[in-house]
Amino acid sequence: MGIKFRDDIQGYEVTFSKRHPLTRQPKSLSRTRNDKGDLIATEIEAKRIYNQLVLQVETSFEEGAGGKMKVATLREQFYESMEMRDLAPSTVENYRLCLDAHTRQWNNRTIESIRTEEIRALIKVTLAERSPSHQKSMLKFIKGLFGFAVECGYLQRNPVPMLQFRLGDKIKKVLTREQMKQLLEKAREMNHPWYSVWAFALYTGCRNGELYALTKDKISLHNRTILISSAWDHKHGFKEFTKSKQDRTIEVAPPLIPIIKQLYAENPDSNFVLPHHREWTEGRQAEILRAFLMGIGLPPVRFHDLRASWATALLGNGVEPAKVMIAGGWSDIKTMMIYMRKAGISIKGMTDNLHLHDPETPVGEVISIFAKQGDG
C-alpha cells in the first residue's frame, strides 16, 4: 500500500500506480492533501484517500477502454491533475475557462474520435477573428488536455497539430517622461486619492498586486530599499510570492521618500504602505487611471502600462537593461527587448559615424549640359 509519512511536510503521502490492462501504460496518482486542501494528518485518513485513488484509477481505465472516455470527462480529470500539481489558481482557471468555452461541442464525443483536422479548423477557422496570441494559447491548452490523455494511457498519440503563428513583438503603450511628470503633478495638485499609488507604480515599476500587498516592514528608508516578496489579486487574495516566484530588492527613488513618510503619518496603524481603495480591491485600478488621464488630456493607458513606462524611462536614462530587468522582476528577456526598442536603446549611436557627404558645404554654380540644342 502506497502510504508513507513524510517528515519534511509532517503529513502522509498517498500513492497508487497501475498499468492499463490494454495499453500497458502506467497510471500513477499521488496526494499529500485531503479534499479540503489540508495535509493528510492521520493514517486512517490516508487509507481512505488511498481507496479513492484506487477507484479513480480503475474508473479511468474503464472509461478509457475501447475509446469510451468522453471529452467532458477527460477535461474534469485534467483540471483535477492541474490542481494537484500546485499550479497557480489563475493558471488552472484560464485553462478551465478557455477549454470549457471552445471544446464544449466535443463534450459527448469520445476522445479517440477527435481528429487533427478538427483541431486545426478550430484554431484557424473558428478562432480566425481572434488574435494570433489567443490562437496560440488555445492550441497550448488543447495540447495540454490531450497530452494528459496520452500520459494516462487513454490515447496512443496526441492529435494536436503543429501550427505557426505570426505574433510579432508589439510595443506596449507607455507614457513619456514628460507625461509621467504631468500625471504626478496634476494628481498631487488635485489631492487625488490615487496619487500615492501612481507615484509608487512610476517610481518602483512594481506590478499592481505587488503594490497592493506591500507592507511597511518591507521598506528601509535608511538603506533606501524595498523588498518585493508578495503579491495579491482581487480573485485569489494575498500570496507569499511574486509572479516570478522570486523575491527582489529595489531602490527607493529620492522623490518617493517624502511620499512614504506622509503615508506612514496618515495611516500609522496600518501594516500596508498604500491605501486600499475600494475600487482597487474590486480590480478597477485601470478604469480609475484611464479616466484621470483623459481628464487631464493625456493618452489613456492601463495601470500595468505604468510599469512599462518606468522601464522605458530608466532605459532612456542609460540604465543598463540587465539592472532594469532584475529590478522589475522580469525573467523573460523577450519582454525587456520590447522595452529597449520602445526606448530606442537598440538604435542609439548606430548612425553616429555614418558620414557619406557634407550637405552644408557650399556648392558652385551649376551649368546644365542638357540645354536644348539651338539655345543661345
Image (cartoon, rainbow, N blue to C red):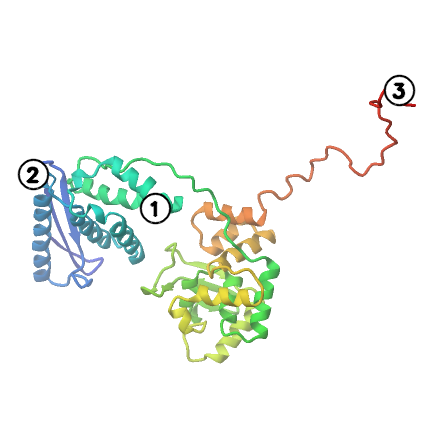
The amino acid beneath tag 2 is Pro
Looking at the image, do the residues carrying marks 2 and 3 touch, with CB atoms under 8 Å apart? no
- C-alpha distance separating marks 1 and 2: 34 Å
Q: Mark 1 vs mark 3: which is more N-terminal?
A: 1
Left or right: 53 with respect to 269? left
Q: Residues within 10 Å of mark 2 (few under 14, many from 20)?
A: few
Question: Which label is found at residue 137?
Answer: 1
The reply to whether dot 1 and dot 3 touch (C-beta < 8 Å) is: no
| Label 1 vs label 2, nearer the camera | 1
Q: What kind of residue is marked 1?
A: Ser
N-terminal of the pair, mark 1 or mark 2, is: 2
Q: Position of residue 241 (x, y in %)?
A: 36, 60
Q: Secondary structure at mark 3?
A: loop
- Would you call the spot at circle 1 few (<14 residues within 10 Å), some (14-19), or many (20 or more)? some
Q: Amino acid at mark 3?
A: Gly
Mark 3 is surrounded, within 10 Å at the Cα level, by few (under 14), some (14 to 19) or many (20 or more) other residues, namely few
List the residue tagged with mark 2: 21
User: Can you tell which of label 1 and label 3 is closer to the viewer?
Assistant: 3
Question: In the image, which disc is placed on residue 374?
Answer: 3
Q: CA distance from mark 2 to mark 3?
A: 104 Å
Residue 28 in view (yes/no): yes
Residue 163: name its quadrant: top left
Say whether residue 75 is left or right of residue 282.
Answer: left
Task: Give the residue at x 60% y 42%.
Answer: 347
From the image, state whether disc 2 or disc 3 is nearer to you.
Answer: 3
